Amino acid sequence: GAGVSQSPRYKVAKRGQDVALRCDPISGHVSLFWYQQALGQGPEFLTYFQNEAQLDKSGLPSDRFFAERPEGSVSTLKIQRTQQEDSAVYLCASSLNSGRTSTDTQYFGPGTRLTVL
Amino acid sequence: AQKITQTQPGMFVQEKEAVTLDCTYDTSDPSYGLFWYKQPSSGEMIFLIYQGSYDQQNATEGRYSLNFQKARKSANLVISASQLGDSAMYFCAMREGFAGNQFYFGTGTSLTVIP
């Protein structure tokens, strides 16, 4: 009965290092979202995939952020040359996207807490 | 303008009492969905309840109900018979249009249940 899983749960990086965050969505879910949650704030949208297609990346804060979902299931969010302002919790969510709005609930993973020193 | 506004940074409620968490939203799209999530200290966002813009009745899920006032653009969450385990952050979110669109979140309300 797997929900959305994310790894690692915690990541500490030195400024300038590259990091890769993984998301395993709920099996069969078409849509996958990445959000960034700063301390004391609500999640903010980064990017959205429908199957393997990245349909919206308008929330990515800079070209140092890159996301992929090559086979339409697992997704990776990569941050190059990390900066201190990248410190946040990165949340992944998936939804069935059956076309019926009532089943478009997004189910979230536990998040990856990234700390950039 | 903020899509979702939660004006209560923190709320306290006595155990077994009911509490209302406020949420107002802003959209010109006639089709939208409203969601409430609970985020305990562990960090995971837990889905609580959904209300569609065309739904005629207020949504209910167990002890959770949504007081949907479309004309006022408000979607307040009511938790009845509060329990100690209800202590957490609560986020209101909105999706404009149909499936696949991003969620807009408010800044959250921290709820503390007092024994």
Image: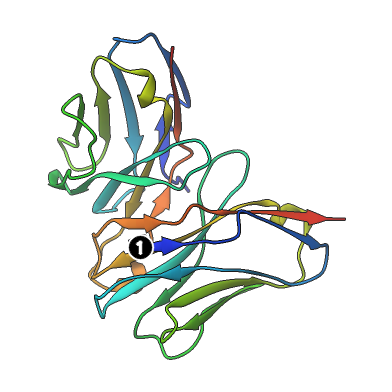
Q: Residues within 10 Å of mark 1 (few under 14, many from 20)?
A: some
| Residue shown at 32% from the left, 65% from the top | B95
- Side (left or right) of B36 relative to A84: right
Where's residue A58, x and y in %? 18, 45
Disc 1 chain ID: B
- On screen, A16 above or below A108? above
| Residue shown at 37% from the left, 25% from the top | A85
- Side (left or right) of B14 relative to B106: right
* Residue placed most toward the observer, A117 or A95: A117
* Residue placed most toward the observer, A12 or A100: A12
Q: Amino acid at mark 1?
A: Lys
Where's residue B92, x and y in %? 48, 61
Q: Where on the picture, by quarter, is residue A12?
A: top left
- Side (left or right) of B88 relative to A39: right
Q: Please, what secondary structure does the residue beneath circle 1 have?
A: loop
Where's residue B109, x and y in %? 59, 55
Count of marks, rendered view: 1
Residue at the extreme right = B115
**In which quadrant will I find the C terminus of chain A?**
top left
- Colour theme: rainbow
| Residue shown at 27% from the left, 78% from the top | B31
- Side (left or right) of B50 relative to A26: right
* Residue placed most toward the observer, B57 or A73: B57
- On screen, A85 above or below B113? above
Q: Where on the picture, by quarter, is residue B35?
A: bottom left
Residue at the extreme bottom = B56
Give the residue number, with chain letter if any, for mark 1.
B3
| Residue shown at 35% from the left, 70% from the top | B26
- On screen, B2 above or below A86? below
